[in-house]
Amino acid sequence: MPVVVIDGGASNARALAASDDGRVLGAARGPAAAAGPVPTAEEAAATGLLADHFVALLTPLVSGASDPGGRAAAPRGIGGEHPHVIAGLAGTARPTGAARAESALRQALQRVGITPDAVVLTTDVHLALQAVATEAAGPASVLLAGTGSVALAMDGQGRSAQAGGYGRHLSDEGGGFWLGVRALAAAARATDGRAPEARALGDAALAALGLADLDALVEAAPALWGAPQRVAALAPLVLRLALAGDPAAEALLTEAGARLAELALAARGRLALPASAPLGYGGGLLAAYLAEPEEAAAKPRGSSPTASGRGGPGPSGPPRPVAGTAPAGSGARNRPRFPNPLPAAVRRHLP
């Protein structure tokens, strides 16, 4: 019996199909597959949109076509099979999100012609933790940073503890949306004279969104805050400029690393995990390499962002990659990549 595993976040999703003997039958990438809170009046529309996203993700696995990145998906397809479907999705820790996600996933499976043997729904962070804990065969923890952020730990008795992951309105410190908001705030602070050193970062953030000036940002802000993926897509720009030595971007990199480390330490501390318990990194914003920002964002006024070599792997070595390490940003797979300084920034704040 084949297995289909879905890893879904607020920016993108991945799916993998494997046979019962461990052979990979196919892989695909698709749009966001998260089930965060929405107003009750929008629940039906949100379920329909999520189902459409699942259809886009699963169709290549059924047809044996290629995914949008041009990579072979399922060589022979899994149509007609009865797979065991496991979905780890952001936003499903709470009943309303879980119900919406399960309804949307079952609709999508029916639409693409998959009759599952079983459907198991969990969160993206639990899926990632399970991967690390299985390899460690003992206590483990995981830190995810994509559009949002969260840490989860598990001890040897199977007890778990979470830190963060409450959505962009309350937490998500160090994640893509958090970084993007601060890059846009830099534009405001540079314009009114409070932070002239943030001029290059602010100009780059505005240019990346096609905004002419601060007035345009103020007008666009309500819509942008309702589209977290667009704001989160600014995060690689911040990290790229930090590598180039931009002082405002470097300060944000340092703060993001501290906030993410704080999440990991809090989750591990609640269970008193030993120092030997591994910490896995996941999510698009903690990938080893990120896609270069778009040209307009990569070359802001007064900046020449070429890699300085700062922010490379720290003394503890590279992080353990887990589920959800697709590069952040729309069309990221088609652009060159640069070394991500954020994992090393996190490690600098860990014991």
Image (cartoon, grey):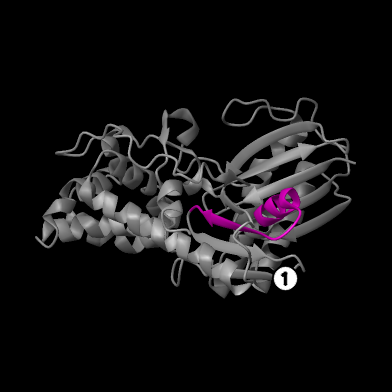
Query: Which quarter of the rendering shows the N terminus?
Result: top right
Quick check: 335 left or right of 250?
A: right
Quarter of the rendering containing residue 96? bottom right
Question: Front-most of 4 and 80?
Answer: 4
Q: Magenta segment: does it hold 245? A: no
Q: Position of residue 79 (x, y in %)?
A: 83, 36
Can residue 215 be seen in this snapshot?
no
Q: Residue 43: image x %, image y %?
A: 60, 68
Which residues fall within the magenta stretch?
128-146
Residue type, numbered disc 1? Arg
- Name the secondary structure under disc 1: loop
* Observer able to see residue 110: yes
Q: Quadrant of residue 256?
A: bottom left
31 relative to 279, above or below: above
Residue occupying image coordinates x 45% and y 66%? 168
Q: From the viewer's perspective, tell me whether residue 135 is left or right of residue 324.
A: right
Taking the image as shown, residue 37 lies to the left or right of residue 76, namely left
**Residue 153: percent from the left, percent from the top?**
63, 64
Q: Disc 1 designates what residue?
A: 159
**Left or right side of 342 for 79:** right
Up/down of 231 relative to 93, above or below: above
Residue at 80% x, 26% y: name it. 76
Say above or below: 96 vs 254.
below
Q: Quadrant of residue 40?
A: bottom right
Question: Residue at position x 22%, y 57% from top?
Answer: 186
Q: Residue 130: within the magenta?
A: yes
| Place of residue 240 in the rendered image (x, y in percent of width and height, measured from the top left) | 33, 40
Nearer to me, 207 or 22: 22
